[in-house]
Image: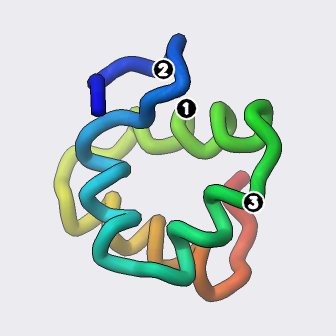
Amino acid sequence: MQNNTTGDDIPLGLGMALAKNVDAMNYFSSLSKSQQQDVIKKTHQFNSMNEMQSYVDNIANGQTFN
């Protein structure tokens, strides 16, 4: 995984958070590339792994990512 948003790879922090939540990982994988990029852009505002994990857990619970 590379820490960028221009390729097919996702940022390391997001990847680690998704790996801890299989439901969120499956949901993220089901999104279109555009929707995945929207999620990735949103994660740039987080300053801690706890914030990232909370966001990812909310995705798994069906809460919107906007």
Residue 39: % across, % down: 60, 45
Q: How is the image coloured?
A: rainbow
Spatial CA span between label 1 and label 3: 17 Å
Question: What is the three-letter code of the residue carrying label 1?
Answer: Lys
**Label located before the other in sequence (2 or 1):** 2
Mark 2 and mark 3 in contact? Answer it, CB < 8 Å: no
Spatial CA span between label 2 and label 1: 8 Å
Q: Which residue is mark 1?
A: 41
Quarter in which the N terminus is drawn: top left
Q: Is residue 9 left or right of residue 46?
A: right
Question: What is the three-letter code of the residue carrying label 3?
Answer: Ser
What residue appears at the point 46 percent right and 66 percent down from the top-left corner? 55
In terms of image quadrants, where is residue 34?
Answer: top right
Q: Is residue 48 left or right of residue 56?
A: left
What residue appears at the point 51 percent right and 16 percent down from the top-left corner? 7
Is 24 located above or below residue 51 in the figure?
below
**Label located before the other in sequence (1 or 3):** 3
Is 29 located above or below residue 11 in the figure?
below
Q: Answer few, some or many: residues within 10 Å of disc 3's Cα (few below 14, many 20 plus, some between 14 and 19).
A: few
Residue 46: % across, % down: 33, 46
Residue 25: % across, % down: 52, 67
- 45, 49: nearer the viewer: 49
What residue appears at the point 28 percent right and 24 percent down from the top-left corner? 2
Q: Which residue is mark 3?
A: 30
Mark 2 and mark 1 in contact? Answer it, CB < 8 Å: yes
Q: Which residue is mark 2?
A: 5
- 18, 58: nearer the viewer: 18
Spatial CA span between label 2 and label 3: 18 Å
